[in-house]
């Protein structure tokens, strides 16, 4: 990848772990079964891009721009999305492993997380207004000063969050998930 700008390009089966891909620009590109783990993507711009079956674990995203980027069947373990540029930040995740990743202070309004694992993910101070967590595992995920207004967690599971430390007005929870809202009281629900 010597060029700085790629448009309508399909990258398939590329293995570039730990490579420096900083400050490149990808528009309407698709990445299929690529290993970009630990890559330096600082300052890189992705516009209307799709990642399928890719490993992006531990990528560096300082000032990276993710403008309408969809991830399908990807591994994104330990990724700090909080360091991405806020300008037009828009992502979605389907059937992804996003464990130990951080969304600290990210604006994630109406973001869709579907059939994904978000174990120990950090959503501290994130704006998840109207976000959807469809069939997602949120075991030990951190929600502190998080805006979850109108968020849909009806099919999410293993979450534990304190309604007194987060904004939850209009958020939707299933009956089976109510225990996750009462964890701090150390009570037994049968």
Image (cartoon, rainbow, N blue to C red):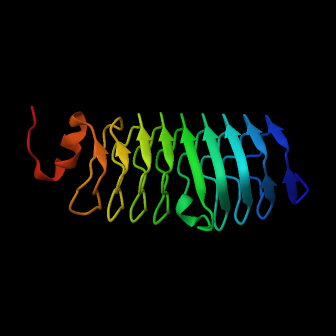
Measured as percent of width and height from the top left, residue 52 is found at 68, 36
Q: Residue furthest right?
A: 3
Measured as percent of width and height from the top left, residue 17 is found at 73, 46
Q: Residue furthest top?
A: 190
Give me the residue at 74% from left, 61% from top. Answer: 44
**Quarter-of-image position of residue 149:** bottom left
Q: Which sits in the foreground, 54 or 48? A: 48
> Which quadrant: the C terminus?
top left
Give me the residue at 66% from left, 57% from top. Answer: 67
Figure disc tally: 0
Q: Is residue 155 above or below residue 161?
A: above
Give me the residue at 46% from left, 49% from top. Answer: 100
Q: Is residue 130 above or below residue 24?
A: above
Q: Is residue 54 above or below residue 108?
A: above
Left or right placement of residue 103 versus residue 189 in this view: right
Give me the residue at 70% from left, 64% from top. Answer: 42
Q: Is residue 169 above or below residue 119?
A: below
Q: Which sits in the foreground, 169 or 2? A: 169
Measured as percent of width and height from the top left, residue 10 is found at 83, 40
Measured as percent of width and height from the top left, residue 155 is found at 35, 35
Q: Which sits in the foreground, 48 or 125? A: 48
């Amino acid at each position: 990848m010597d060029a700085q700008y790629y448009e309508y390009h399909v990258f398939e089966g590329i293995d570039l772990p730990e490579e420096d891909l900083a400050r490149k620009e990808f528009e309407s590109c698709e990445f299929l079964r690529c290993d970009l783990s630990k890559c330096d993507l600082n300052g890189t711009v992705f516009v209307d891009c799709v990642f399928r079956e890719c490993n992006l674990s531990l990528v560096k995203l300082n000032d990276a721009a993710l403008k309408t980027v969809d991830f399908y069947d990807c591994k994104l373990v330990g990724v700090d999305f909080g360091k991405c540029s806020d300008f037009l930040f828009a992502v979605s995740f389907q059937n992804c492993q996003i464990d130990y990743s951080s969304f600290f202070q990210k604006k994630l309004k109406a973001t869709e997380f579907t059939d994904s694992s978000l174990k120990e993910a950090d959503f501290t101070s994130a704006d998840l207004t109207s976000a959807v967590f469809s069939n997602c595992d949120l075991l030990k995920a951190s929600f502190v000063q998080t805006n979850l207004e109108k968020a849909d967690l009806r099919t999410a599971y293993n979450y534990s969050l304190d309604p007194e430390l987060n904004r939850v007005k209009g958020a939707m929870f299933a009956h089976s998930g109510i225990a996750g809202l009462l964890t701090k009281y150390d009570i037994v629900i049968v």
